[in-house]
Amino acid sequence: MNMNLPADVQNIISVLESNGHEAYAVGGCVRDCILGKIPHDWDITTSALPEQVKALFSRTFDTGIEHGTVTVLMHGVGYEVTTYRVDGKYEDGRHPKEVTFTASLEEDLKRRDFTINAMAYNESRGLVDLFGGEADLQAGIIKAVGNPTERFTEDALRMLRALRFSAQLGFEIEPATYQAIKDLAPTLERISAERIQVEMVKLVTSDHPERLREVYNTGLSKVFFPELDVMMECQQNNVHHAYTVGEHTIKAMELIPTDKVLRLTMMLHDIAKPACKTTDDKGQDHFKLHPIKGTDMARTVLRRLKFDNDTTSKVCNLVKNHDDRPAINDRNVRRMIIRVGQENFPDLLEVKRADTLAQSTYLRDEKLAYIAELERVFHEIVEAGDCLRIKDLQINGKDLIAMGVPQGQRIGEVLNDIFDAVVDNPELNDRQILLNMAQSMIK
Ligand code: ATP
Ligand code: MG
């Protein structure tokens, strides 16, 4: 086994070794290399103590020094160099009470979560694989190192990590590991929203977002996203649909490009359907106003998981508008672009396509033709340079002040009324015309 370590990684290892320490590339980078993927970062594990690491390299940062991690900077790239450690007693199922450094690589590998993540490599010793990680990689299996019940009791987040790796790699979870997740799922409650968010984002932006189904099947979603359980259990007896809300949601996630905002939007777009469901006398289900209620519910979920405001507002905006279908004409589409935001409009088109393709085939061609037409008119409007924002008007607040409109609220009102007129008739966006219009409005 030859892994071709990057020169800087090799250099860090050599410096540590020539000073009497052991050092290996470890964890995710070893796993990714064996899979033939390019690791996104390189972690190094070493017998050297943090102070010793710091003494050997000119540029270091104390990233997590209390856990033994020092970041070594080389050519602008940071490498995390962590001292071999055993995690102390986990008293809260979240983090070890203390970490103890150890001289044994084996101890360090034993504390890692899954066999595929518990391999180390360096040039002198080659691959160190004490738990059958390479075989599990070849077989496509996520398996806890040691006793899964004990390992998930130490740190409940590992249960969600198992699903996240299974989604990223398309792997199956080994039966005993899976059973332990089902048994211990409620204990995920001890884990902070921030840590859950990290794993969920990796899961939903993976090649297998459909593994979200396992988040439900294992009972994990009940802890931090019970709305998913409700969606999974909500039938849609309606010609437009072929699946439960939950299965439609999962299909839609598979059908949209891999992007955090887009995947989260599909995950949440129909979140309010169960709450908005009514059944008519013919037995057909309807979900009136679900995008509106869904906007609030999506915001609640994203806030609960401590997502940033930018992600939250983008997702909520798309959820809110996902089902809007105005008759297509320039005026309506211009107004729709203004509502959604021009910069978000291409995303909305993706959302609509994925949503449509995840529905039944009833009227599918017509729905797709509608979206294509919406897209065509969108581009036409953008290319025409139509006024889509108040600041695109050929006059501004200063012009109004010069005409004698007093500073304050009135300025905004007049500009808004002018904007309204221009949106419906773009040819009005001419400085002289607008000055005249303003003149007549302020009399
Ligand atoms: P990614 O590609 O997402 O970075 P990774 O395997 O590098 O995958 P990290 O979360 O960066 O995952 O963790 C680095 C390594 O640290 C893991 O490969 C694993 O060996 C170990 N590890 C991380 N989190 C835990 C945990 N909660 N319990 C046990 N070991 C862990
Ligand atoms: Mg990593």
Image: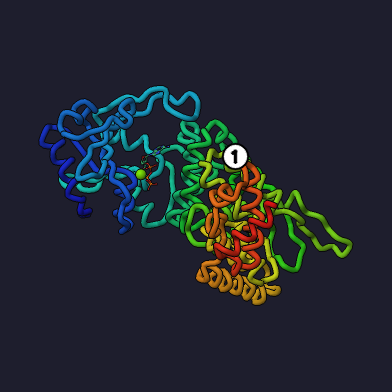
How is the structure coloured here? rainbow
Q: Residue at x 59, y 59 (%)?
A: 435
Q: Examine the rendered structure and indicate whether residue 439 appears above or below residue 85.
A: below
* Label 1, residues with CA under 10 Å away: few <14, some 14-19, many ≥20: some
Residue at screen point 28% across, 29% down: 62
Q: Nearer the viewer, residue 349 or 426?
A: 426
Query: Is residue 149 shown to the viewer in this render?
Result: no
Q: Is residue 306 left or right of residue 249?
A: left
In this orientation, does residue 139 appear? yes
407 to the left or right of 32: right
* Residue positioned most to the left: 18
- What residue sits right under mark 1 in the picture? 224
Where residue 372 appears, as percent x and y from the top left, is: 59, 73
At horizontal 68% and vertical 50% (from top left) the residue drawn is 294
Q: Quadrant of the N terminus?
A: bottom left
What amino acid type should be assigned to the residue bearing mark 1?
A: Phe
- Residue 24 falls in image quadrant: top left
- Image coordinates for residue 201, horizontal then vertical, percent: 49, 48
Of 223 and 303, nearer the camera is: 303
Quarter containing ligand 2? top left
Q: Is residue 198 above or below residue 378?
A: above
